[in-house]
Amino acid sequence: MMKPDISFAAIDVRLSPALLASIPPSGDDQPPSPELWPGRWHSEAAIAMKALGIEGLIDVEGRWFAEKMGQDPDLSFDAQLGGGSIKPDHQITEFFAEAGFQWPEGFTLADCTANIHIDSTIVRMTDFNGHRRGGQVDADGFISREGEEQALHVEFRSIELEEYLLDLVPEG
């Protein structure tokens, strides 16, 4: 029996439904039937990316491997988004509300860049930068794929005060 250890890289890959469908399950995030993944079932990481409406090209470098003989292989990869955009769909409010975050309805970003790491334990975003009407949004955060841990840090610079931002102001 062989231990799988495959490295891969791709440049200028368009984010697509097929690419999102290939993001593997992890921990409690499992398809109801093994035949559904890859392809017909989406992991929570893929659902989050779809809800965000991320578009653009990414560079990807990763590895599919098993540490021990007979062990299920893990997938670990890093992606760099360049010149992307975020145009959230209606699912984003519900998805992020469940995670304890709020995304203002109608808030879109252009010229987005980010570094994303996904493995069996975590989805981590660093160095996110996006632009809206002369303003800038910087962010980093993570969502654990094994437990309930998550964090998001966002900074807004020169963002116009628009009606949707009222959703971010605490009540009281």
Image (cartoon, rainbow, N blue to C red):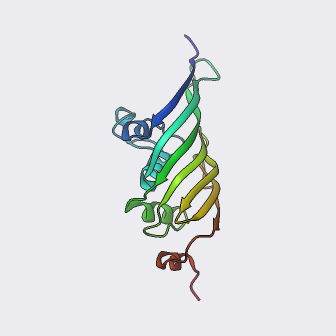
Q: Residue furthest top?
A: 1
The quadrant of the image that shows the C terminus is bottom right
> Is 6 left or right of 24, judged from the image as shown?
right
Identity of the residue drawn at 43% across and 59% down? 88
Viewer-proximal residue among 23 and 127? 127
Viewer-proximal residue among 152 and 135? 135
Residue 117, position as x, y percentages in the image: 61, 41
Identity of the residue drawn at 63% across and 57% down? 139
Identity of the residue drawn at 55% across and 43% down? 81
Q: Is residue 75 visible?
A: no
Residue 124, position as x, y percentages in the image: 62, 47
Identity of the residue drawn at 52% across and 68% down? 102
Above or below for 56 versus 166: above
Above or below for 74 versus 140: above
> Is 54 left or right of 172, judged from the image as shown?
left
Viewer-proximal residue among 62 and 53? 53
